[in-house]
Image: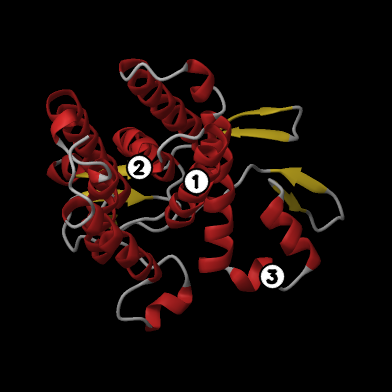
Amino acid sequence: MNNLLLSIHWNPNPELFNLFDAISIRYYGLLWAVGIGLGYMVVHYQYRDKKIDEKKFEPLFFYCFFGILIGARLGHCLFYDPQTYLTSFKGFWEMILPIRFLADGGWKFTGYEGLASHGGTLGLIITLWLYCRKTKMNYLDVVDMIAVATPITACFIRLANLMNSEIIGKPTGTTWGFVFDRVDMLPRHPAQLYEAIAYFVLFLVMLFLYKNYNKKLHRGFFFGLCLAAIFTFRFFIEFLKENQVNFEDQMTFNMGQWLSVPFIIIGLYFMFFHDRKKR
């Protein structure tokens, strides 16, 4: 009985429902959408709070959505699985389109099943630069506002991973933990849940700082804090995760950790060394 209380058997159906036996609606995509939607609302609140013209806000969602989606998809395919997506014509199109080719020659809509947060972050940084060129807004002002909202989006992305039973943790070595039935019967660290909780706490910290110290903090501080906090936690939580791809087994630090280091350095720079002139 005690063992049952200490471990949770986790095996939800990742598919919420299926339309016409062709279009699969999954929790993964739904939670991604909820996370981006909440982030959108938080940024919209900041625009109104700062009395920024609504017309400048209107195109922001387009830039953010496609920057995150394209960057995250390319990041997964290029950083973690290039041998699948870059070595065949079908693999290339599966990287670009949300489909999977079937053995009988047909195809099935699956959504984008592989997305990498480092790629999504880089894609967002690039598309926000394009957005600022179009709207003539200060780049750091915009990324600061995005940074306040980012942790809540990251929280829901990790919940999406949990619903997919992916990016699982290593065995706990005890009787407590999540048993991912689709993987094995070992109690494991629910690393996705650890991250989701950490990012939610960071989101609360961001809101507190914005409400109470926004005018006292220099441009770029929120951007730096977001990068440094999220990717520092990501670096250390990787020690509790199973490697995502086989080639990582030969690495001292896995791909997620190596990709986190540049973002941590950039974050610390904007927190402590960039122009500290007050807003």
Secondary structure at numbered mark 2: helix
Q: Quadrant of residue 169?
A: bottom left
Pointer 2 local density, CA inside 10 Å: few below 14, some 14–19, many at least 20: some
Residue 48 placement (x, y as % from top left): 37, 15
Q: Residue at x 75, y 35 (%)?
A: 22
List the residue tagged with mark 1. 129
Q: Amino acid at mark 1?
A: Trp
Secondary structure at numbered mark 1: helix
List the residue tagged with mark 2. 140
Q: Residue at x 75, y 44 (%)?
A: 108
By what rule are the colours in the image chosen? secondary structure
Q: In the shown orientation, is residue 27 left or right of residue 155?
A: right
Pointer 1 local density, CA inside 10 Å: few below 14, some 14–19, many at least 20: some
List the residue tagged with mark 3. 86
Question: How many labels were placed on the picture?
Answer: 3
Front residue of 20/279: it is 279
Q: CA distance from mark 1 to mark 2?
A: 10 Å
